Image (cartoon, grey):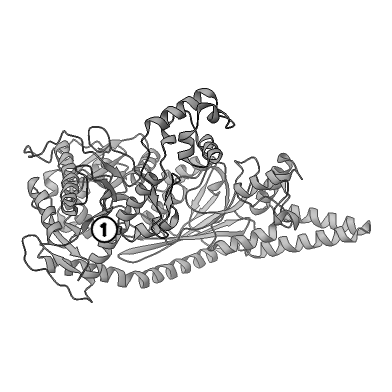
Amino acid sequence: MADPSSYRPKPGQIPDSPGVYKFRDEHGRVIYVGKAKSLRQRLANYFQDLAGLHPRTRTMVTTAASVEWTVVTTEVEALQLEYSWIKEFDPRFNVKYRDDKSYPYLAVTLNEEFPRVQVMRGAKKKGVRYFGPYAHAWAIRETVDLMLRVFPVRTCSAGVFKRSAQIGRPCLLGYIGKCSAPCVGRISAEEHRELAEEFCDFMAGRTGAYLRRLERRMQEAAEEMEYERAARLRDDIGALKRAMEKSAVVLADATDADLIAVAEDELEAAVQIFHVRGGRVRGQRGWVTDKVEAVTTGGLVEHALQQLYGEERGDAVPKEVLVPALPEPVEPVAQWLSQRRGSQVSLRIPQRGDKKDLMATVGRNAQQALALHKTKRASDLTTRSRALEEIAEALGLDSVPLRIECFDISHLQGEDVVASMVVFEDGLVRKSEYRRFQIKGFEGQDDVRSMHEVIGRRFKRYLQEKQKSGEWTEEPDVDTAAPVDGVLTAAGEPDRADGRPVDDDGRPKRFAYPPQLVVVDGGAPQVAAARRALDELGIDDVAVCGLAKRLEEVWLPAEDDPVVLPRSSEGLYLLQRVRDEAHRFAITYQRNKRSKRLKSSPLDAVPGLGHTRRQALLKHFGSLKKLRAATIDEICEVPGVGRKTAETVAAALAGAAPSAPAVNTATGEIIEDDGAPPAALSAERGQER
């Protein structure tokens, strides 16, 4: 626990102007980001007597080891910079709303030549028009099914669209009248885009004029005694009205507004948002957050506005935003919203009438969401806390292991040896911290030696980070300037050539933060290897244990007998989850590597020979063996292969040694150069480690 006075800025050093500040912990990780109208007055509040601080604020300032700030011109700039830094650094002591589900949207891909109507989740894409969010994907599909009768816009995937265009025959929707079939040229691209824009206009709430136009056309058809066309128009009007009925009218004056309500207690807060467009509720969503900082209702509303509109522009920001409490001060937030919309945005508390009644409904939804969340999470919090306490007690740790890293080795009979590192923080997975390793120090099957190498490489990187940040004052006993070969990120991208992480500004990445507990998949030999690797690096503040699969025994270094946790122990269950996740991550990586190796071919290394011509060569000759025996003139007979390419292919195959024949272990047949069939791969998986 740090003393805030140890890093308190000197008197007069902090400027009396607007700005954004960051608190960092002893590892340089950003743990809190805040903004202030006056940096001097705001930061002075953090360095008063600890007894006068809010408990969460007290925890933050004692966890921090330094504070820094950036001066800006206006409070609006401070708001924008605060949002950018919270998104970039993901500080643990800031309020961060998490969606209680991934909400689906009705999307129209106007960025394509032939726009498509579909269900979309996740991050919004440029050039796509979104409507919603909806509570369920089936609600979108029901609405679209009704709308396609009147607006037969394309809904098929790119593959189906391309296939229909190739064969000159539309899919089923084209035959039943729910698609205008632009794939076969029934309408032009311009006509289809106009149809998609009419669909968007109707979904955006401009419904009255379109319905009146259809009713007028229906009456004209009836007067001209075209009763079949009039009946179709009547059915179209009915379908549109049924689609509209799914969105209840809540505001009679066709208001475009977002209503935000907050329900909170001492520990958590739930936010509910109703999106009202054209007086109808077009979408609803909810967030839940831990109150890890001392924050008022207005502060919660401000954080919600940042997350809701931080990536939005134009009409996605409504003209009116109704909230239960205004941020303090409210002017910078209102100005920021207006800048994002491009016109004036009203941010206010509803006082009377329909809007106040609707806000009460949104508030009741927020209360129900918080109650449901607490019901689901209460047991989870209690269970995780008990599991960590049981682990600390069983292993004799001074405190509960808030960060646990688990390592596992995977291979197939000594080939493609890889390792995994998974991370659990506060008993929950932290997938962004997962890492994968290739074993390159030796060849063959040796789990103990592999574990020693992986642990050494992981903590060597940790020492590099400490030395780079100035935390490591003594020269370590390892060559910290040497690159660490074979380390991959979770995305499979290699680190920089000097072996150091790219991030040096506090972002939570790579190997910069040490665990309190290292778990290895194995028994006493693997545990001894891990402990020896840490001792060689001079690291003595990280506990090590191993979990053996046979009897689920927990092994400790230099102990002859294992620790046996009760089968009903929550601590044992957590260790099993950690171990199983490491095994899953390792074996997935190992299978991917082996799959790529089995699919490799000498043709892959031929420059200028793409996938299409490789397939043409193999299809023409039937196998790689027959291709290797072919002459240059015979290779030239393949369509698209010239003499120069044929000479390059022949030279490449002549220089590549023929591989040993593969054997299908299920049938015993020899497979000539085409690779192992699925049956052989299935038999191999039984021998994976």
* Residue 427 in view: no
Looking at the rendering, which quadrant does residue 404 occupy? bottom left
Please report the residue visible at 9 percent of the width from the left and 51 percent of the height from the top: 532
| x, y percent for residue 19 | 31, 39
Q: Residue at x 63, y 51 (%)?
A: 156
Dividing the image into 4 quarters, which one contains the C terminus?
A: bottom left
Closer to us: 159 or 418: 418
Q: Residue at x 17, y 73 (%)?
A: 565
Measuring from the top left, give residue 583's x and y in whole percent: 28, 58
Which residue is under mark 1? 424
Callout 1 secondary element:
strand
637 and 151: which is toward the camera = 637
The correct choice, above or below, for 382 with respect to 170 in the image is below
At which x and y percent is residue 569? 21, 74
443 to the left or right of 248: left
Q: Nearer the viewer, residue 285 or 655?
A: 655
Kind of residue at badge 1: Phe
- 74 relative to 171, above or below: above
